[in-house]
Amino acid sequence: MNENPYSQPPPNFSPNDPYASSNNPYASSNPYGMGPDAGPGSDPAPGAQQANPYAPPSLGADAAPWAQPELAGSLPLAERGTRLGAALLDGLLMVGAMLPGVALVAVDETAMIVVMMLGILGLQIYQWYLITNTGQSLGKKWMGIRITMLDGSPVDFVHGVLLRSWVMGLLGQIPFAGGIIGLVDVLMIFGDERRCLHDHIASTKVVIAQY
């Protein structure tokens, strides 16, 4: 009877399975320090703190103080002269917005009025956008000051624009009383709080912008 050639082990065959023995280099401990059961669903080690992936981003120590009420509340008040300079700059910008319309005075009076109104409206919308998002008009930004709430938190559209500007604009249109209200608004800046009437209406103040 012939022997089955496949029943004999091949030459130099070792009965020890290199992949099942302790000589297997891949059977050693995980160099990354995770046990065999570690994985996405495994429990963390006792006492280990896991980061919350749903937590909102932290402002951190480098965040601007005006965005942190606890720090912004301590910012110094803007000087009266600085506030005046910012108001003058915003006024000059308004004049500049009307110049394209003025150039049409010899061409068409209706076109002049339309272009002037569009220039003023465009500038005002941009200024309102800046105040709502940064607390600064262009003039205030150039002068390094910012509008905040009394507690130092950032203003929103209601307090920075609607109450602070629109309400005062409407009050100024009251016959006879409008002029007096405007004068009182300006004179109140000389108080200890350096807050005008529109600041009191909107519960705002103007501080030095450090960022």
Image (tube, grey):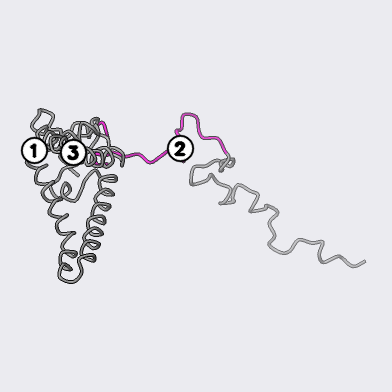
- Image spot of residue 161 (x, y percent): 27, 42
Is 53 displayed left or right of 28 in the figure? left
Q: Quadrant of the C terminus?
A: top left
Among the 4 quarters of the image, the one containing residue 209: top left
SS category of the residue bearing label 2: loop
Residue type (three-letter) at the residue carrying disc 1: Arg
Mark positioned earlier in the residue sequence (2 or 1): 2
Give left or right: position of 32 versus 97.
right
Horizontal placement of 157 versus 105: left or right?
right
Q: Which residue range is magenta in the image?
A: 42-70
Residue of label 1:
80
Q: Which residue is mark 3?
A: 175
Amino acid type indicated by mark 2: Asn
User: Which of the two labelled residues, at mark 3 and mark 2, occupies the earlier sequence position?
Assistant: 2
Report the residue at 59% width, 50% height from top.
23
Find residue 117 and report its horizontal and vertical position in percent. 24, 58
Q: Which residue in the structure is indicated by mark 2? A: 52
* Residue type, label 3: Pro
